[in-house]
Image (spheres, grey):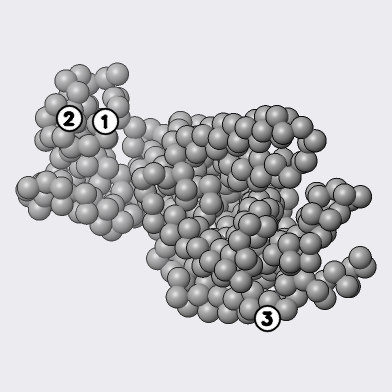
Amino acid sequence: MRLWTRLSTSSALWTAPLWLGIVLFYYTWALHTVTGTFSRPRAELHWAASVILDATEHFYAFAYALAAALGAWEAGRLRKDGIWNLAPARSRYRVAAGVLAPPVAAASLMLVVPSLLALIEFRLAPDPRAILPVAVGIVVICSFSIAGFAIGLRVPRAIAAPLLAAGGWYLVAFTVTYAAPAWPGNLLTQRWYVDFGAYLTAPTLAMPVLFCGGIASAIAICWIRPPAPLARHLLRVSAAAFAVLLATVSANTANAWSINPPTTAGHAPETCTGRAPTVCMATHAGSADHLARVRSSLVSTVSTLQKAGVKVEMPEGVHDTEGRPGKRSTGREWWLPLTQQVSRNNGSLVYVRYSAAMMTVQFPCALPQSFDAAREPAYIVNADAAKLWVARRAGVEKPFLKWRASQYQELDNGDEVLAKVKERAADAERLPGHEQMAWYGRERAKACHLATGKASS
């Protein structure tokens, strides 16, 4: 059958206004107005993998339901015309592929079109790894189409098609509400999300293919017509066992992810400048436009503290954690959320200076991660007095006090602690310069003694 003849007789063509209308309406209205996914500035909107996942998230249910419904309709047409049972000269797979190609293409466009629209809207290149989720979706579409086709061979198409359209959409769309078990959402809805600079891992992408593809393959295997009844029975049992095995493995794997499938981070490109320190920031999201200012601010902050007597060396490198996993900072290599800090306070670099100032405060021990974990909670007064003294030297007192005031809300006497911290730092500033440095050393040592019972690690 010629291509145009096949298309013109396919249900995919005469239903095109419906499914294309859903795509265009939902993309322009829901994603920009209702959910607000594309209406607010986020770093992820500069990352193709994130944009494609956001653009297609709500279309999987529509695409799978469409594939199943049109597959059932086409199967009913073949059953009505008697073609399925009267084509011994042609493979059943060839017959099924011929009628299912247009429905699969139509359902695939429900994922491809919003992906292309999003890439165009945000002026992003179609990264090969970013479009892999769409490829996975197309494989699952093929699986739903095969399942719908199989149902349409047994159930009248006037009944099967609308039931599969409504039931398929409901089955997939509402899996997003499942926190436990988590596998339906991870395998059917593809409720995936990646941060800026991250990609989905291979197992994340493979599990939906194994689950849906295994079931579809088992259905298709049953279309083989061995002459012997025993062979037909063994073939169907083997196919069912194969499908159950793949479904069990993939469901158990996906269920272990909860609602956060594994991703691999650290792929965002970065731009660097300078030496000692070499400062690197994310290339996307406009961060690199501020690179020279950020480096200058970092250098001036460290230099100012060095002149004030703080014993700190200029780092060799300062790296942006935006789009990268962020390693543990050392004295020579700092990892700071530079992109986030630049975007705060109307582009002022006060938070960049604040982070640099806090990086210079080194204690002779590892301080507790929480107030309750300390041997004596009073350590926080000495530790924060030392930090506040450094913050004042660097001109970043306001962001420091704002951050600590929010932390002190966990304490019953937070206001008293904050007042005591300010008092100790103010008393230190009245001392002569060399005595201030001695006080700074004592405060850090006392904080370690109260927190851990020892003054050095």
Describe residue 21's horizontal placement relative to residue 180 as left or right.
Answer: right
- Quadrant of the rendered image containing residue 27: bottom right
- Quadrant of the rendered image containing residue 373: top left
Q: Residues within 10 Å of mark 3 (few under 14, many from 20)?
A: few
The image position of residue 403, as x and y in percent, is 27, 53
Q: Residue 448 carries which label?
A: none
Which amino acid does the dot numbered 3 rest on?
Pro
Q: From the image, tell me which residue sits under label 2.
A: 374
Task: Say what secondary structure mark 2 lies in.
Answer: loop
Tell me whether the residue at label 3 lies in contact with that at label 1, contact meaning CB atoms closer than 8 angstroms.
Answer: no
Above-or-below relation of 431 to 451: below
Q: Which mark is residue 17?
A: 3
Give the mark nearest the N terminus, 2 or 3. 3
Above-or-below relation of 245 to 201: above
Which amino acid does the dot numbered 2 rest on?
Ala
Q: Which mark is residue 367?
A: 1
Task: Say what secondary structure mark 1 lies in.
Answer: loop
Distance from the alpha carbon under mark 2 to that under mark 3: 65 Å
Relative depth, front residue between 182 and 289: 182
Residue in the image at 50% along x and 75% along y: 30
Tell me whether the residue at label 2 lies in contact with that at label 3, contact meaning CB atoms closer than 8 angstroms.
Answer: no
The image position of residue 452, as x and y in percent, is 19, 23
Relative depth, front residue between 323 and 161: 161
Describe residue 44's horizontal placement relative to residue 451 as left or right.
Answer: right
Q: Which of label 3 and label 1 is nearer to you?
A: 3
